[in-house]
Amino acid sequence: MIKRISALVIFISMYTTGHAHEMIDAVESYQADKRTLDATYTIRESETYYQRFGTFYKNWNKRLEAIRFEELSREGKADYIMLKNRIAKEDYHLELAYEAYKKVADVTAFAGDIYIFIRERRHGKRPDAKQLAARFTAVSRQIVNKTEALKAKPFEDWVQAEKAAAVVSSLHKALEEAYGFYFGYDPEFTWWMEKPYEELHEKLSAYETFLKEHYADNSVKDDGSGIIGKPIGRDALLKELAFEFIPYTPEELIATAERQFDWCKQEMIKASREMGYGDDWKTALEHVKDTYVPAGEQPQAIKDLFDYSVNFIEERDLITLPDLAKETWRMIMMTPERQKVNPFFTGGWEISISYPTQDMSQEDKLMSMRGNNPNFSFGTVQHELLPGHNLQFFMNSRYKSYRRAFDTPFWIEGWALYWEIILWNKDFARTPEQKMGMLFWRIHRCARIIFSLKFQLGEMTPQQCIDMLVDKVGHEYANAEAEVRRSFATTYTPPLYQVAYMIGGLQFYALRKEMLEKGWTEKQFHDRVMKENRMPVEVLRAVLQDKPLTKKFSTQWKFSTDFK
């Protein structure tokens, strides 16, 4: 019994204090500090917010400099590099936002008394209600005057106008919270403040609406698609790629995607010939779309695909799939609102099924069913569940969980896409229809790189992106529109998110090849990746291959961009 307890103590000691965890306290403290400040400084668009977070990043850089990097283990050095990179990336985005803020900060020049009221509310200071009511009334008049003064001075473009509106919205939201803290609880506050607040609330709402549409007539906001995006430009793309440890230019990535696109197209033609449609791959694809299951049968179709993929993977002993992970995955149905942005199922802890609901039009119902047919889903159920996102979430909660701070889509989406590549190479598809389904998503991921980078470079509009997905990939129009909307007009996707699927997959594929050449088995490689948690793949490569890491580590791994 004593020996067993001693062994357990040694194991726990190694896990919690061993070299691999030298940086865990720093990483978790950074995350905790950031969450605390976010909860305190709730007016995101304010001088106070930008100054405080600028100081936060500066202080954390000083804390990192105090760490003796050369004395860290390899994994400790990897954590140091990733934390330093995370701080630099967040500080960079803060500076960009701050520069944009300073150009429009004057839109709330009247709000000094409101900012004081919101700040003092944090610690519950009781305001002089009579005096505050007079201030609110005065601010309401100042907003009217400010609106009139701005009418002759439109913002230079819609991006600047939306930033100005966001400044007012941020103030307004914090004001509502502070007012609600006292109203109904403090009798004097409630008696004095109700009407002045209602007037100020109305004026701020109108002011925000005015600012959002107050930009120069020559600033084009909508190309006719109804999708509003904000291209960031080549210099910003290069900066983002460096933060993600990708040593290629946007143009090189586009060229890679175009080569892979052509490969996919040739494979689609081969599948089309097997189906009896000759080189007419578009007609073959239309046939595959019509293999959808009737309404009500989609959950069972997904379950069947899940069972097949798990059996296929386990028969070949490709990766460890824990019994608990296989037991606890689950399904939910995607809401109609969510389907407008994402027309295909998504995954994680559960798989969210996208399929028609009774209130959809007949046209939308058919597009959803055709776009989610079992052959299209054939190559992506394992992307969302096991060994894709579901397994990632499962393992991330159990191994080196602090590294979730280093989240990157090149690891998250790249790993899931990597399995599509691996399974294709292992003849996962049994029929030409299944091949066509897998290739449809493969070519779609290539198209994502092309259209998203060209949009960010200012070379394609959202409508041109939609047309590309319809004409060159074979999407239903509504599904293509939703895909582009998801890419550019939501907070879901940062600029490189759509690039990360295929490029991250190629990184994992190249790393796999290197590790197999070193004598690793596929299962050893896959299991180790899952136990290292999230990180840029180039840093993972350095950890797995015991490569030297320097304090000023930067991307240099020119991984192969060939997945054949």
Image (spheres, rainbow, N blue to C red):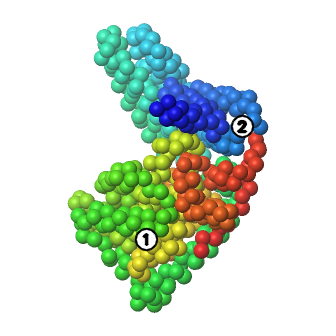
Nearer-N-terminus badge (2/1)? 2
Judge by depth and name the residue closer to the eye, 322 or 502: 322
Q: Is residue 235 left or right of residue 124?
A: right
Counting from the top left corner in percent of width and height, residue 157 is at: 58, 48
Circle 1 crowding by C-alpha within 10 Å: few under 14, some 14–19, many from 20: many
Q: Is residue 208 left or right of residue 54?
A: left
Residue at image coords 52%, 33%: 3
Which structural element holds mark 1? loop
**Callout 2: few (<14), some (14-19), or many (20+) C-alpha neighbours within 10 Å?**
some
Q: Would you identify the image quadrant in which residue 75 lies? A: top right
Q: Nearer the viewer, residue 511 or 36?
A: 511
What residue did someone put label 2 on? Answer: 72
Residue 293 as seen in the image, left or right of residue 503 = left
**Residue 148's mark?**
none
Question: Could you say where residue 211 lies in the image, as x and y percent from the top left?
Answer: 49, 40
Amino acid type of the residue tagged 1 in the rendering: His
Q: Is residue 464 left or right of residue 327?
A: right
In the image, residue 498 sits, relative to residue 169, either above or below, namely below
Q: Is residue 211 visible?
A: yes
Give the Cα distance between marks 2 and 1.
50 Å
Q: Secondary structure at mark 2?
A: loop
* Residue 354 x/y as whole percent: 34, 60
Q: Nearer the viewer, residue 473 or 270?
A: 270
Tell me the quarter of the image containing the C terminus.
bottom right
Q: Amino acid at mark 2?
A: Leu
Q: Residue at x 52, y 27 (%)?
A: 36
Residue 475, label in figure = 1
Q: In percent of the image, x 50 and y 63: which residue is there?
A: 318
In this rendering, the answer to whether 191 lies above or below 221 is above
Q: Can residue 465 be seen in this snapshot?
A: no
Mark 1 and mark 2 in contact (Cβ < 8 Å)? no
Q: Position of residue 70 (x, y in %)?
A: 77, 37
